[in-house]
Image (tube, helix red, strand yellow):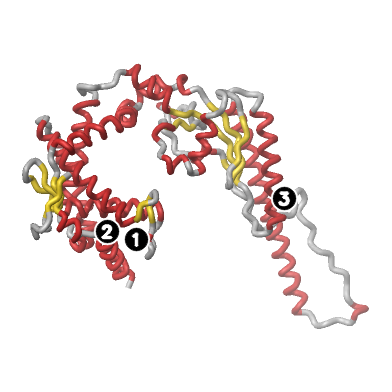
Amino acid sequence: MLTAAGCGDTTYVMTYNNGVKINAGVYLYSMFIEMSNQFYYSGYAQDFMDREVDGQPMSDYLVDQAKKSAREFAAVKAQFEKLGLSLSEQEEDEIRSNVKLTWDSNSELFELEGISKESLELMTRADYERQAVFNYYYGDEGIERPSDDELVSYMNDAYVRYKSIRISKAYDSDESAREERNKEYQALRDEFLEKAKKVDFAGFDDIIAEFDEYEAQKAAEDAAAEEAAQQEAALESAADTEDSREPVADEDSVAEVKAPEEPEGEEETSEEPADEVTTDGEDAVLLTDADTDGGEPDPYANEILRNYANITATGLESEAGKLMTAVMGLEVGKAEAYEDDSAYYIIIKGDVSERSAEYAAENRESLVSEMKDKEFQAKIDEWVKEIGVVENTDAVRRYTAKKVFDIQNDYYESLSK
């Protein structure tokens, strides 16, 4: 990529195809969005610009991402026009609606950042044009449309399928109490693990159902015990209040007062709430439809079906990523124990090929996007080389990541005053 310096005009950040300009607002909007993503991942704080992303200083990372986005914006737009593609009227309506909604909500901050409504419209339209170019190659009528068999084969190689039971560890501040409770939770996990070892992947649903029933019963017992304890405390408090109103009696005249009896069938409980005990099947985001027609139970409700091959290196280092890596190493249909810093698990691996044909048919569009994402990115990288991008270094020097951050920071501080 060539660079041009000393031109003085910083209203554009790059040119391509012998002089077509990419305005500065496109570059600034790209940096703004990536900065917002990093706020989401690592949190907003005054030291934000001192952080690193994969070993790269935040400021350098944000500039690189904004440059990359601007180059790809130009490359895709050029290819969209080269192929003679167009957007539908419905898509045009969606663009207008999305731009209006975003601008109405953020216009004040955008204008402070140097992002015009025109730049916002260009970047919103770019998403639709990118999808149109992708569909030209890989869509239902695409010239490189993958076959059904290719999708199924990809899914069998890339996906992981599993079910699990998760028991959260205790977090008592007292170490001995924490260790004692975790021994109980580990024993509970091991008890259900022995049951799980006697069933296959389909039968694991029965173990989950039994565990859920245990959890519900325990929660009910804990709630009843806590209510009984509260009632007893209330009665004792009332009795103490009544005693304080009586004159002090001579020792010989004090009558014996029996403490109120605990309600039959109830038992004392700690005031500390019970630790959360859940199955992953209840709260995980599945890549399958949760409901079926006619209100029938979803046969896959307890399953996780995930594209393991597309998980980033950072994602693989997360607890969920490490869990799926452990699942990948299991024998299909054989339950095993697993543990991380936050919980005890029972996990069982399923055969992806039992579901891949059905899933691929029902989710073709999203699966094609996953399958062809890297291949399409390689095409974009080639188009960037073809259009001869020239960078306006004066503009890049002017629109620094720190300046974008400082404007946001000052803006939000002004709102809080």
Q: How many marks?
A: 3
Left or right, 261 with reference to 390: right
Residue that label 1 marks: 49
Report, in whole angstroms, how far the alpha carbon at label 1 lies from the one at label 2.
8 Å
At a point 23% along the width and 58% down the height, the residue shown is 106
Relative to 367, say whether 282 is above or below. Answer: below
Q: Which mark is residue 180?
A: 3
Kind of residue at disc 1 = Met
Kind of residue at disc 2 = Ala
Left or right, 381 with reference to 40: left
Rate crowding at label 2 as few (under 14), some (14 to 19) or many (20 or more) other CA atoms within 10 Å. many
Q: Are marks 3 and 1 in contact (CB under 8 Å)?
A: no
Rate crowding at label 3 as few (under 14), some (14 to 19) or many (20 or more) other CA atoms within 10 Å. few
Considering every residue shown, the one lying at the far left of the view is 19
Image coords of residue 207 (percent x, y): 62, 30
Q: Which mark is residue 401?
A: 2
Q: Is residue 391 or residue 103 the one in the foreground?
A: 391
Does the rendering let one see residue 297?
Answer: no
At a point 18% along the width and 61% down the height, the residue shown is 398
Image coords of residue 243 (percent x, y): 77, 75
